[in-house]
Amino acid sequence: MKKATISKTKNQLSALLEEVRRGETVLIMDRDRPVAMLEPVRPDAAGVSGWIAELERRGVIRRARRKPPRRILAERPPRAKGGASVLEALLEERAEGR
């Protein structure tokens, strides 16, 4: 946990917030007494929609424009054939350039 005085916090707030974004917690001190704490917001605290919006903003995900067809959700996923290998399938896809 990093410690910062009130004056340092005022002067370097952007830098401290960048550290918080990376997961660091910053304890704000006033004359050697803790008065506040800056810590990262947990995804559940911002709500799932806030977390998803953050992932979308960073380009990690892209939201669907419409709901998926019901049949996709109702169908069972395909089963692997006996003796099938995920590694072999991956290597085959790479060889085909997919």
Image (tube, rainbow, N blue to C red):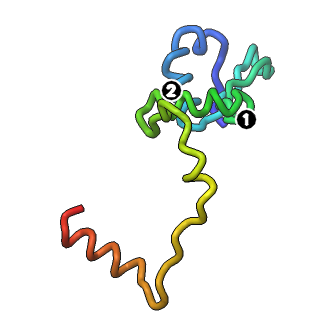
Return the disc, 2 or 1, that comes first in the chain's sequence: 2
In this orientation, which residue lies closer to the viewer: 19 or 31? 19
> Quarter holding the C terminus?
bottom left
- Element type where label 1 sits in the image: helix
Residue at (55, 36) in percent of width and height: 67
Give the residue type at disc 1. Asp
Q: Residue most toward the bottom?
A: 83
Image spot of residue 65 (x, y percent): 47, 30
Mark 2 to mark 1 CA distance (whole Å): 20 Å
Image spot of residue 91 (x, y percent): 28, 76
Q: Quadrant of residue 7?
A: top right
Image spot of residue 77 (x, y percent): 55, 66
Rendered view: 76 above or below 85: above
In this orientation, which residue lies closer to the viewer: 69 or 57? 69
- Which residue position is annotated with label 2? 18
Give the residue type at disc 2. Glu
Rendered view: 7 above or below 18: above
- Determine crowd level at label 1: few under 14, some 14-19, many 20+ residues with C-alpha closer than 10 A: few
Question: Left of 44 or right of it: where is 58?
Answer: left
> Quarter holding the N terminus?
top right
- Determine crowd level at label 2: few under 14, some 14-19, many 20+ residues with C-alpha closer than 10 A: few
Residue at (63, 56) in percent of width and height: 74
Residue at (53, 75) in percent of width and height: 79
Q: Residue most toward the front?
A: 71
Rendered view: 81 above or below 6: below
Mark 2–mark 1 contact, CB under 8 Å? no
Image spot of residue 72 (x, y percent): 55, 53
Question: Left of 3 or right of it: where is 69?
Answer: left
- Which residue position is annotated with label 1? 44
